[in-house]
Image (tube, rainbow, N blue to C red):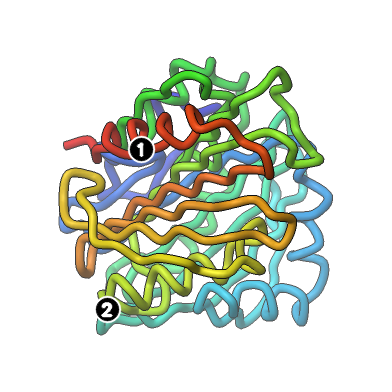
């Protein structure tokens, strides 16, 4: 897959996806999603697969009901797989989520409607075929994202996130564990959480599920153009005196793109202006 370190043999009928890291069937009903995470995230992600109660608790927050955990062998390592289902948009999808740990931490999700021809042996065989190569360059990883976005000074692109997002940072440090620098995260998803097409409701769900801003206080909500269509911008204050801005645009029943900007106390005015310019640049790829 372009821009990905993952190599795999998908089930029959799956083709490389044109607008995300993974594969999709010609009818668009079944897909394989590849999410690459930093290697240092492995311990935290691995705890989600420690036992069935942990897996059920975590995946339930995403609307996925896990039935069981299973281990498979892939590329000489033991890989945990969470197996379950998810109801969304009038369909029930079978889901297989596998965790791979190497130079990067990788989650691969196979999903198909229960009435689809994809059978469990074929899904598990595809997951067992996964190998991890050398990480892609930043340019390659950015080219594989399903959207375009242009950084504006003082922000610069630091990395891609899970094959579906990017991180921009302002300030001298590329790594900022204390949160002392302004930062921007842009992310997309090919399905709508909470099974909702309501822009305001979905915005609230996403803000409430984002650790860095979920304790903030919304101050203003405004209809804006974002992602090339009608969207919404929410601005708010943070407990430490900082601010946040959350942009969201969604295509009902299909996908969404969001931008989260976090401004520590004392952030310069040019950082706020740059975020507005970055937001205007966001477009989904055809």
Q: First in sequence, mark 2 or 1: give its number.
A: 2
Mark number displayed over residue 229:
none
Q: Which of 286 and 98 is in front in this view?
A: 286
Camera-side mark, 2 or 1: 1
Q: Residues within 10 Å of mark 2 (few under 14, many from 20)?
A: some
Q: Nearer the viewer, residue 113 or 202?
A: 202
90 relative position to 129: left or right: left
Q: Is residue 156 above or below residue 263?
A: above
Mark number displayed over residue 89:
2
Q: What element carries label 2?
A: loop
Percent coordinates x, y for residue 31 in the rendering = 35, 55
Residue 242 seen in this snapshot? yes
Q: Nearer the viewer, residue 284 or 3?
A: 284
At a point 41% along the width and 64% down the height, the residue shown is 111
Q: Is residue 236 above or below residue 260?
A: below
Mark 2 vs mark 1, CA separation in Å: 32 Å
Percent coordinates x, y for residue 79 in the rendering = 71, 52
At a point 59% along the width and 49% down the height, the residue shown is 107
Percent coordinates x, y for residue 104 in the rendering = 69, 33
Q: How crowded is mark 1: few (under 14 residues within 10 Å), some or many (20 or more)?
A: some
At a point 23% along the width and 54% down the height, the residue shown is 224
Q: Is residue 113 above or below residue 245?
A: below
Q: Is mark 1 on a helix, strand or loop?
A: helix
Q: Is residue 179 above or below residue 195?
A: above
Residue 15 placement: quadrant = top left
- Residue under pointer 1: 276
Residue 136 placement: quadrant = top right
Residue 16 seen in this snapshot? no
At a point 57% along the width and 27% down the height, the residue shown is 159
């Amino acid at each position: 897959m372009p821009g990905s370190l993952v190599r795999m043999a998908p089930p029959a009928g799956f083709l490389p996806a044109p607008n995300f890291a993974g594969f999709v069937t010609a009818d668009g009903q079944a897909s394989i999603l590849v999410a690459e995470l930093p290697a240092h995230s492995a311990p935290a992600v691995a705890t989600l697969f420690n036992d069935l109660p942990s897996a059920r608790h975590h995946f339930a927050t995403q609307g996925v009901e896990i039935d069981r955990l299973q281990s498979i062998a892939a590329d000489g390592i033991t890989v945990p797989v969470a197996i379950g289902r998810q109801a969304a948009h009038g369909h029930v999808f079978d889901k297989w989520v596998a965790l791979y740990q190497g130079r990067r931490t990788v989650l691969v999700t196979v999903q198909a409607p229960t009435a689809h021809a994809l059978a469990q042996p074929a899904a598990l065989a595809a997951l067992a075929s996964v190998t991890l190569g050398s990480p892609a360059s930043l340019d390659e990883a950015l080219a594989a994202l399903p959207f375009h976005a242009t950084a504006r000074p003082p922000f610069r692109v630091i990395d891609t996130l899970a094959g579906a997002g990017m991180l921009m940072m302002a300030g001298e440090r590329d790594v900022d564990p204390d949160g002392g620098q302004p930062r921007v995260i842009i992310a997309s998803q090919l399905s709508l959480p909470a099974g909702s097409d309501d822009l305001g409701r979905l915005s609230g769900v996403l803000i409430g599920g984002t650790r860095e801003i979920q304790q903030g206080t919304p101050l203003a909500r405004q209809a804006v153009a974002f992602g090339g269509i009608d969207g919404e911008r929410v601005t708010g204050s943070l407990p430490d005196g900082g601010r946040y801005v959350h942009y969201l645009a969604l295509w009902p029943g299909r996908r969404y793109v969001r931008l989260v900007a976090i401004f520590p106390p004392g952030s310069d005015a040019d950082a706020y202006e740059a975020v507005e310019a970055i937001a205007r640049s966001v477009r989904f790829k055809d």
